[in-house]
Every structure is written in structure tokens, then in C-alpha cells.
Amino acid sequence: MSSPRTRSLAPLPLVGVLAVGFALAIAAPAAAHNFIVSSTPADGENLTELPEQWQITTNETLLDLGGQGAGFALLVSDEQGLFYGDGCVTIDGPGLSTPAALGADGAYTLTYQFVSADGHTLSGELPFTWQAPADFEPHVGLAEPPVCGETASAPAPEPTATAEPQPDVTDEPVVDAEPVEPVSDDASLIVIAVFIAVVVAIAGVVTAALMRARGRRKAEQTDGPEGADL
């Protein structure tokens, strides 16, 4: 006959097996998710040469139902929110890729999304920086995320400041200058009369002086001989 202590410990191995099995059942779906094993660019990488493709490689074949790339995306954007590339994604076994394109130097982000082998959609971001070589020609950034096969529009140029229209000088009323009053005829006559009076006065003075001088000469001539006879 077994003791009460022995009977209470007997079920423990079965409980342990059930607990381990339950834990494995929960962990199994999570372990089935694909995870990234390599990428171009790498997380935080400083690129100095533009690669041919942006690429994500996972540990297991990706689930591309219908072969149309539904649920897959690789997008590159800059600090201003502009997008680069054509939006087309190629799925090849465990990896996905898209043609690489970048603009001017600066910080960029590669945003990815893929469908894991277990059917779960996973997404994330890989930030990186770009230092273009001297001969690099920057691509044009797009205002909206590109869609494969569709022509994307470049961002509209910022409006330039326009000069405010100036009023037409011909529209402004012309202010007539006050007319200059002509000199009246009376004033002109007065000026002329004064001028004549001055001339006459000067002539009179000159005439009187000449007459006095002539009178003195005659008196001198007359007194001269009489003085001689005495």
C-alpha cells in the first residue's frame, strides 16, 4: 500500500509533459515567422556607392500567393518625405528586391513588407545614410509612393513670390499747378514811368551842370579884356 506522499507525487510527470507541450504549441507559430538574415542596405549603413538593388533576404521561402507580389513592398524615402524608385518588387524564394534609386546626400529609410511562410505579414524599417560620389546624378523624388507600372508625379514646385502689381501712374489724377498770374498792364506802366522819370532827372542834372559850366567860361572871357583896359 502506497503512502499518501507517494500518491501526491505520481501525477507530476504527466503535468510537466502537458505544460511543455502547451508551451511548444504556443511558441511554434511565432518561430514559423520569417526573419531577416541580410539586407541591402544594412541597418544604419552609410552608403557611398549606389547598389543595383535594394534587397531583403529572409531565412525561409516567402509566401507569394498567386505570384503577383500581393502584400510585398520595398520603398525608399528621404527626410522630406519624397519617395524614390518605381515601386516594382521581385520575390525570389526567401528574398525580395527592387531597383535602387536615390536623390541627394542625406538620411533615408528603406521600408519593407513581406508575407512570411506561415501567412503572417511582417514589416519594418531600415534607416541608412547616403553620401553620393562626385559623378552621381540624383534621381527625382516623388510626392507619393510609387506604384509598379504607373507613372508617378514629381512634387509640385514651391510657389515663388510674385511682385504685387503697381498702380498705373496714368490712372492717378493729375493735379494742375496753380496758374501764375501775369503782371498787370498797370504795373508795367508804372515801371516804365519810373524808368523814364529817372532818365529825365539824370538828363536834367547833366544839362544844368553843362549850362553852369558854360556860364562860367563866358564870364571869364568877358572879365578878361576889361581888366586889361584899366
Image (cartoon, rainbow, N blue to C red):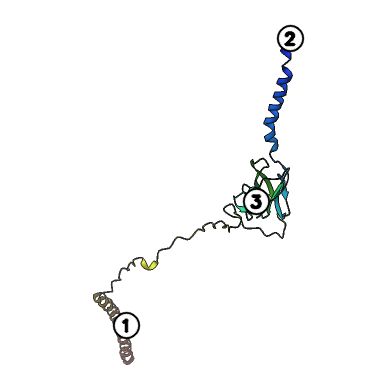
In the displayed structure, would residue 116 be above or below residue 105?
A: above
**Residue with the mark numbered 2:** 5
Q: Mark 1 touching mark 3, by CB under 8 A?
A: no
User: How far apart are labels 2 and 3 at the CA level?
Assistant: 63 Å
Under circle 2, the secondary element is helix
**Residue with the mark numbered 3:** 67
The amino acid on which the numbered mark 3 sits, given as a three-letter code, is Gly
Q: Using the image as rendered, state which of residue 25 and residue 51 is in the foreground.
A: 25
Q: Nearer the viewer, mark 1 or mark 3?
A: 3
Under circle 1, the secondary element is helix
Q: Is residue 30 left or right of residue 210?
A: right
User: How far apart are labels 1 and 3 at the CA level?
Assistant: 134 Å
| Label 1 Cα crowd, 10 Å radius (few <14 / some 14-19 / many 20+) | few
Q: Mark 2 touching mark 3, by CB under 8 A?
A: no
Q: Mark 2 touching mark 1, by CB under 8 A?
A: no
The amino acid on which the numbered mark 1 sits, given as a three-letter code, is Val
Q: Residue 190 sits in which quadrant?
A: bottom left
**Residue with the mark numbered 1:** 206
